[in-house]
Amino acid sequence: MRVEGQQPSGRTHQSETKNPQQPDRGHFQNWDVEFTPTLGSLLNQLAEFLEDVALEFKPITEYLCQVLTLKNLMRTASDLRHKSEKASIDVKLEYTDSRSERIKLKARKELNELEHRVKKGWSDFKDDVKAGWNKRVK
C-alpha cells in the first residue's frame, strides 16, 4: 500500500530493521506504509541491541566495578583538588609583584602540601589497620 500523491524513488524497502528513507526537503519520497516498523518491534530491536552491547562490555564493566570503588574515587578527587590548588598558587606566584604576597603564597603552598600528605598518610594508615584487623578476625 503506497501513500497517495508521492512519487516512488525506485528504491525498495530492504527490511523492517532499516529506517524509512530520510526526508528530502521535508517530504518523504517513498514511504511503504505496510513496512513501517511498529513500536513493539522497534523496542524489541533496541532491547536486543542493548543486550548485545552489555555482553560485549561485560569484562570491562566487571573490571571497572572492582577498580572504581568509592575509596578510589575519593582519593582521586582529593588528588585533583590538591593539584588544582597547587596550580592556582603557582599562577598567582608567577604574576604577583608583591614580596609579602609571594611569601604568603609560598607558605600556603607548603601548608597545602603538608595537609595533603598527612591526609593521604592517615588514609593509608587507616586502610592498613582495617586490613590487619580483618585478617586477625578471620
Image (cartoon, rainbow, N blue to C red):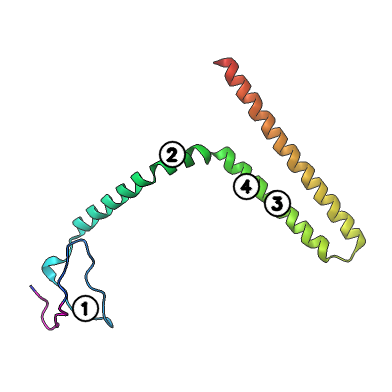
**Residue 123 location, quadrant:** top right
Mark closest to the chain's N terminus, 1 or 4: 1
Circles 2 and 1: CB distance less than 8 Å? no
Instruction: Determine whether label 3 and label 2 are within 8 Å by CB.
Output: no
Write the residue at 61% across / 20% down: 133
Precedes in sequence: disc 3 or disc 1: 1
Please state, as top left, top right, bottom left or bottom right, where the N terminus lies in the image. bottom left
Main secondary structure found in the magenta portion:
loop
Q: Which residue is located at x 61 percent, y 24 percent?
A: 131
Gap in angstroms between the C-alphas marked 1 and 4:
51 Å
Which residue does the numbered mark 2 point to in the structure image?
Answer: 62
Distance (Cα) linking label 2 and label 1: 45 Å
Instruction: Find disc 4 in the rendering and name its residue.
Output: 77
Q: Which marked residue is nearer to the observer: mark 3 or mark 2?
A: 2
Q: Amino acid at mark 2?
A: Glu
Amino acid type of the residue that numbered disc 3 sits on in the rendered structure: Lys
